[in-house]
Image (cartoon, grey):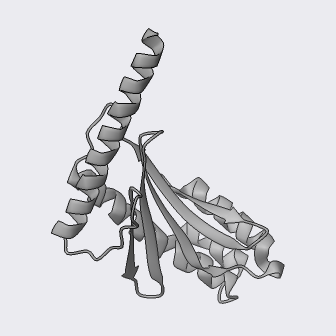
Amino acid sequence: MNICIEEVAMENANQKNAQIVFDMISETLKARNLKFVKPEGQKSVYLQVAADEMTIGLLIDVDEDRQLIRMISMLPFEFPKEKRIEGAIATSMTDFNMFDGSFDFNYERGVVTFRITTSFLNSVISPAVCLSMIGRAFTTIEDYGVKLMKLANGQMTLDQYVDLFDEE
């Protein structure tokens, strides 16, 4: 009997914490005059930023069950079938050289997705942390995503892509 009461209490606490975090994210974006879409009934927001060479969309999702903030961006290009091995190699190499976040490569579809997460389990996420995560996501996508896009579009060879990491 006590286990059920404890589980309900934990679930209620998780819901409350997730709502607090989601409200903070929404208010932080509003305070920065960032335009975003908030789907009804979800603890998610979607925003877009036009960078120099691509428009970057970012879904910010609050995962109530796992107590995570997840930021996900599907990059606006695909690797053609004949370049997917290069895409897989380049994505893996990129991830190896990054300190935060990751790029996921779907070999079947040739698409690349960026993802970064942080936990709010037993902690407080401030607006500054939220903005830092958003900034890191957009900076990382702009830096590496454009290079991956050039590789996918044939504007860069895999050897040229690999050489970029030697320069860093």
Q: In the picture provided, is 11 more to the left or to the right than 73? A: left
Q: In the picture provided, is 21 more to the left or to the right than 156? A: left
Residue at (41% x, 31% y) in the render: 11
Residue at (82% x, 79% y) in the render: 81
Residue at (48% x, 70% y) in the render: 141
In the image, residue 75 above or below residue 91 = below
Pinpoint residue 94: horizontal percent, then vertical percent. 59, 62
Pinpoint residue 71: horizontal percent, then vertical percent. 45, 59
Name the residue at the right extreme: 82
Name the residue at the front extreme: 1
Pinpoint residue 40: horizontal percent, then vertical percent. 39, 64
Say which of 4 and 47 sits in front: 4
* Res 168 visible: no
Where, by quadrant of the figure, is residue 6 drawn? top left
Name the residue at the top extreme: 1
Pinpoint residue 167: horizontal percent, then vertical percent. 53, 69
Where, by quadrant of the figure, is residue 110 drawn? bottom right
Where, by quadrant of the figure, is residue 68 drawn? top left
* Res 52 visible: yes
Residue at (57% x, 72% y) in the render: 164
Say which of 68 and 44 sits in front: 44
Q: In the picture provided, is 39 more to the left or to the right than 165? A: left
In the image, residue 5 above or below residue 14 = above
Q: Looking at the image, how many numbered discs can be counted on the residues? A: 0
